[in-house]
Structure formats: structure tokens, C-alpha cells
Amino acid sequence: MLPALPVRATTDPPRATAADTVAVGVFEGEDVAHDTSGGELQALLDAGEARRTFGHLALAHADGKRWLVVGLGDRERFDAERARIAAATVAGRAGELGSRSLCWEVPHHVSETVAGALAEGTLLAGYRLDRFRSPPDEPPARIEEVLLSAHHDVGGAVARAEVVGEAVNAARALADTPANEMTPTRLGERALELAAEIDGLTAEVEGRERIVERGMGAFAAVARGTDEEPALITLRWEPADARGPVLGLVGKAVTFDTGGISIKPAAKMFEMKFDMAGGAAVVEAMGAIARLRLPVRVVAVAGATENMPSGHAMKPGDVVTTKAGFTVEIDNTDAEGRLVLVDCMAHARELGAERLVDLATLTGAIVVALGSTYAGLFAEDDDWAQELLAASAASGEELWRMPLHEDYADMIKGRVADVTNSAEKREAQASTAAAFLARASGGVPWAHLDIAGTGWDRGRAYAPKGASGFGVRLLVELAQSVARGRPSTDSATE
């Protein structure tokens, strides 16, 4: 991953900064708020070369700088997510022009959330994982600094955006890294690195022997097939000024998923390095929560393992016992993520979690239902679901609530065990998977986020290909909401 991009706020006007490129946004029905001395930007609009249509770009040169005029569309529709997309569009063009320092003139009369989103979108657009490529003969120019110029101080929003944006990019790098390097052990090392860097954040990594000793029979069964040591990764953030219930974050971190004995088709199996995207998001969100010093107690658990076929792998028809005490008939070894998650959920509850949310690239069915636009949200507790939806609106990471019904629980009843890990019928597969997870919630308000469609190749301007880091922004916003003791609000539209 490229080095972190410095971002800072300033109250200096853009022309007074050292930036070589300035981005100026214009809304429908409005003109350039502050033009260059010769009126070049307004002249571009008047001539039709620049437009107010969302995402349209035009270039001018004046005062020794490049000026990018970007259309922002309807002011009423311009929220934080549109700001991220506009910022990523500008960053791409500025990079093509060889810009080293980019300054955004923050549009007048927008919230600080929008100012932060402009910084965040620029940071996310700058993500690259280049360390596996041969160095080019001539290194490409890259933006080395981003400034946000506003009439008032937006430093707090920009500083938060810098922390969150870097955490998202770090999660993307974890998920994009090939599985021969991003092993369960390496993911555990990343958690330990974060704890060493951030005062007050603690981490513990336990291997196969302790997973078995803890009664995590489902997790241990998945890990049986691989020679790689599995890792039970636990991060804790317990500040003295913490408020609200203890938040439990649980992530599926299957660092490579062959499907096990129920092996997947060869086509696109290489994508299964992304099957740890939920765990990556949980680990890096914890780093951001701690860096921001949010006053909330959080325990995060990521279950990391490979799912491989071998002479000692779990087999279809096996029965295992979960940490929560119920037994599972293994009908499909490729339904392994839920086996890891139920034991990690029980572990989080044992460590004191009073609210639970899990993230997992769990089912292809959710991709069919929602594509890459929404992650599926499953929850039994309506209040907790609403809190997740509010955090979704505020963070720009979209959730769509999906149904849980007793019929889905009936569909996973086992023949020789309490439940099966894969319902016989192919219908409602995302919901039956969620019904399986619900058995491990133990009465604690819980939500399951199926991010199989949003975890990679999202197609957004700031995350077009590869890992998206989906969930980091959402979890940070959720932690802030829990600390406040009330749901988040979409401040971008206030």
C-alpha cells in the first residue's frame, strides 16, 4: 500500500496556499463563489465547457495553478456520499495532470460532514497495492498532500476523516494481499501491531490448541483441514470515560476458502482471498475507534483460518459442538463462515459484549438479492436494527434490512443434530444462514451484516476494483452512536 496521504484543513483561501491544483465545486443554479482574478472559472461555465452536472470536470490555468471546476449537481441531493464520489473523480483527474498538492475549496453552506467526506474520498481514491509489482522505469506522479480550504475551521471533521480513511485503506490492503502472505498468523500480527501503536488498545492472538480448549468446536472443525495455524484474534478498547453498553464486533476472517471437501468450482476461486474481508474490517475499525479515543467499550473478535480439503478436513455428515452448546450437522463444508462466526459470537458474549454485530462475506445469495449496492442486514431486535440503519445513513455504507422468520429456523433443523449448517432447499439461503447465526446471539441484541456483495469490486469512484474496506466507516459510526447513547443522524443533510 502507498504511504498515508497527509490531509489538513486551512482557512487560507485556495489561491494563497501552495497547492498546485485547486478543485472548485459548483451547484446547479449557482455560479462560482470565488473566482480567480480574471474570472476564468465563471467564463468556463458561461461557455459551457464547465458544467454544473454532477461529476463533470473542466480545467483552467490561472495564478500559476491548475483549477478544476467540478459539477456538484443539485445542492439538495449533495450529501457525504456524493462528496466522496466527487472527491475521487477530482483526485483521479488531478493525478493524471501530475498534481503534487491538491486543495479543495469546501463549498459554502455544507456541513462539516461533507468537508470530511471530501477528504475521505480523496484518501480512498489514492489507495494502491503496488508491492507485488515490479517498479516502473519512471515512477508515476502522485498527490502528496490534500488541503481543505473553508471559511471556518473544519479541522475536526478532516482529522476524523483522515483516521477513518486510512483505516479503510488498511482493511483493503489486508483483503487484497494474496493468501500465501495474508495467513491467519499474519492477520493476528496486524492486530498486535495496532495494539502496540495505540495506547489503551489491547490484543490477544490464540492458536489451534486454545481454540479447542475454549470449546469452539465449530471453528476448530473448519481449521482442521489446513496446515496453517488458525488464529482467534481478540481486540479490546476500554477507555476510562466509556459510556453505553459494551459493543461486540465479530468478523469472519477465512483467509482462503476452497470450500473444503465440498470444493468450489475452479473459476474465480482466486477471489476467495477476500473471504476475510469482514475480519479485516473489524480489526481496522478497532484501530480507528481507538485512535479517535471514542468513549465506548468495544470487544472485537475475528476468527481467522483457511478452509482447505485434506485428509484431516471436516467431512459432510460430521457433527460438531459449538461454544454456545448446540450441535451442528455439517452438510456442506463450504458453509464454513457461519461455523467460525457462531463460536466467535459466543466468545464475544463471554467477554462481556452487550450488543453484537458480525460482518461476513457469507452468501452468494445476498449478491443475487442486493448486488454490490447494499449489504444485507439481519436482526431480531428492531431498536438495534434501527441503530445500524442510522449508522449506515451517516457513514454512507448502505444496509438493507432482510427478513428473519421462524420458517427459516425450521429449514435448518438437523436430521441427527440440533441444526444443519446448510439447508437442503436452495431458497432463502442468506436468511437461513442468518437464522443459523441467531442461535449464538444468546439473547443479546445482535445484527448480522452479509457483505459478500459489497466487500469487493464495488464499482464506486473511490473503490472501483478489489477490496472496498466495507464496514470500517459503518462500525466507527456505530461505536460513536453507542457512546452517544442515541442513534446516529445523517448530518450531511442537516
Image: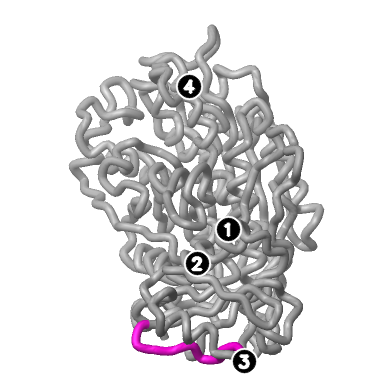
Residue 320 pos. (x, y %): 45, 24
Mark 3 or 4: the one toward you? 3
In this rendering, position of residue 306 left or right of residue 42 = right
Residue contact at pointers 3 and 4, CB within 8 angstroms: no
Q: Which residue is mark 3?
A: 37
Query: SS at mark 3?
Result: loop
Task: Give the amino acid at mark 3.
Answer: Ser
Q: Which residue is mark 2?
A: 84
* 323 vs 229: above or below: below
Work out how far the residue at label 1 is from the one at label 2, CA to CA, in angstroms. 9 Å
Mark seen at residue 124: 1
Work out how far the residue at label 3 is from the one at label 1, CA to CA, in angstroms. 33 Å
Residue contact at pointers 1 and 2, CB within 8 angstroms: yes
* 209 vs 176: above or below: above
**Magenta stretch?**
28-36
Mark seen at residue 258: 4
Whether residue 441 is visible: no
Query: SS at mark 4?
Result: loop
